[in-house]
Each structure stands twice: as structure tokens, then as C-alpha cells.
Image (cartoon, rainbow, N blue to C red):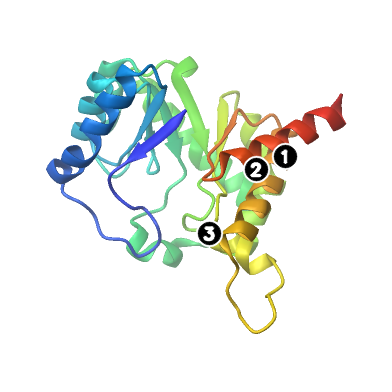
């Protein structure tokens, strides 16, 4: 599945007007959907989500879990699409100010449970809900690792779980620097992503969101062979 987005959600990024976002994503969704490619729409905006589903998207992937736009839950309920609820503690411009946890995995699971309740109350069937613990969103590097180690707390909620570690800063911060530079190449980040993806699948994760599909596919093939 391809995840299509017209607005960056990386730390410090600014919001994009929904009309501009729709101009960016709808032609792409229409073209790819016509080719039979399964798609999700990565958006914080209810209007974009509704338009994208009409254009052919099957999943609405909202990193805020419906908190950024009060109309999102109703829009998803009406659309009939599946809904990926991201763990979110506020806009990317100041998300790290809210990165305070005692037990990150359990707190993330508890906050996701609350969002599931809100989604269900809005008319979104439990079978349509996907949970994303929001790796890299309002979490320090250590907290990201705590959440990954505690994935069982999230899968125990009984919904499909989506993980996105791809090329994120906390992976680069974990790797040893190359001689003469503090930069970690995309290739090394992709390898680290493939490893975390393979480990996540051992915790019954439903899907992983990655940039380098081939490397992750190979890592998953080895992991599945190991498990037998």
C-alpha cells in the first residue's frame, strides 16, 4: 500500500492549507487508484480525507488521531474507510514540549484507548481502526525505544497496529558515527528501519510504514524464516 500525503508532519513543520493539500494529493490518488494500487491518505484535515476516499483511498491515516480537526471522526465514519489513529500530543511545531512520560508504552496505549473510544462513539467500527503509537511524535529517543519495547501493551488493545520508524532521527542517534562526520546516511537509516520493522512484526504488528520497501521486505523474509 502507498501512503500519499501533501503536508509534512516532521518536527517543526508548518501546516498546509487544505485546498493546497488537496491540489497536491487528489490527482495522484486518482491516477494510482485507477491502476488498482491500494492507497492511504496521510492527512490532518477532514475535507482532504473525505475527498481522498472519494478519489480511491482506502485508509485515512491521521497522525493526530482526529485531534487536529474536530470534523475528522465524523468524516471518516461517513466515508466508510479504515482509520489509522496516531498517538499525538499536539502540533509538530512544539511537540517535544509535551514529551513527558513515566512509562511511555503504557501511557501511549492508554491515550490510544481514549481515541478508540472517541472514534467508536463517532460511528467508526472497531474493525476499521488501526493504531499507530506515533514513533517520533512528542517522544524523545529513549521514549521511542520504550514504546517499541512495550508494543505488546498496544497490540493488547485488540486492533491492528501500524509502526513507522523509517529514517527517523532516533535511529540515526543510535548508530555509531562514520569517520569524519556526524551524519548518518539514508542507506544506514534504511537498514536500521528494516531491523526495527522485523522486530516489530514479532510483536504482532500488522504493518510497517517505510521508505525502502525492498530492504524491509528482505528483512521480513529472514525474520519469517527464523520463526519458521
Q: Are marks 3 and 1 in contact (CB under 8 Å)?
A: no
Left or right, 58 with reference to 29: right
Left or right, 31 with reference to 94: left
SS for tag 3?
loop
Left or right, 148 with reference to 69: right
Front one among 113 and 200: 200
Image quarter for residue 215? top right
- Tag in front: 3 or 2: 2
List x then y, in percent, for residue 38. 42, 22
- Report if residue 35 is visible in the image: yes
Which residue is found at the position 33% from the left and 53% from the top?
Answer: 8
Q: Are marks 3 and 2 in contact (CB under 8 Å)?
A: no
Q: Which residue is mark 3?
A: 139
Q: Residues within 10 Å of mark 2 (few under 14, many from 20)?
A: some
Q: Which residue is mark 1?
A: 219
Between the residue at mark 3 and the residue at mark 1, the CA separation in whole angstroms equals 26 Å
SS for tag 1?
helix
Question: Disc 3 or 2, which lies upstream in sequence?
Answer: 3
Amino acid at each position: 500500500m502507498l501512503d500519499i500525503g501533501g503536508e509534512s508532519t516532521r518536527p517543526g513543520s508548518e501546516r498546509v492549507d487544505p485546498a493546497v493539500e488537496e491540489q497536491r494529493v487528489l490527482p495522484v490518488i486518482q491516477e494510482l487508484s485507477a491502476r488498482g494500487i491500494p492507497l492511504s491518505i496521510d492527512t490532518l484535515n477532514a475535507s482532504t480525507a473525505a475527498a481522498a476516499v472519494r478519489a480511491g483511498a482506502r485508509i485515512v491515516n491521521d497522525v493526530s488521531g482526529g485531534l487536529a480537526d474536530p470534523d475528522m471522526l465524523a468524516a471518516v465514519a461517513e466515508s466508510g474507510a479504515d482509520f489509522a489513529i496516531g498517538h499525538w500530543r499536539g502540533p509538530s511545531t512544539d511537540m517535544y514540549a509535551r514529551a513527558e512520560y513515566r512509562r511511555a508504552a503504557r501511557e501511549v496505549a492508554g491515550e490510544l484507548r481514549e481515541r478508540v473510544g472517541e472514534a467508536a462513539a463517532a460511528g467508526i467500527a472497531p474493525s476499521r481502526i488501526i493504531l499507530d503509537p506515533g514513533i517520533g511524535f512528542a517522544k524523545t529517543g529513549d521514549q521511542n525505544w520504550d514504546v517499541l519495547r512495550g508494543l505488546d501493551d498496544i497490540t493488547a488493545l485488540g486492533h491492528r497496529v501500524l509502526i513507522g520508524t523509517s529514517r527517523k532521527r532516533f535511529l540515526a542517534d543510535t548508530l555509531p558515527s562514520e569517520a569524519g562526520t556526524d551524519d548518518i546516511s539514508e542507506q544506514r537509516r534504511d537498514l536500521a528501519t528494516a531491523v526495527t520493522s522485523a522486530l516489530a512484526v514479532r510483536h504482532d504488528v500488522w504493518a510497517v510504514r517505510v521508505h525502502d520497501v525492498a530492504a524491509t521486505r528482505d528483512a521480513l523474509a529472514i525474520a519469517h524464516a527464523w520463526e519458521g
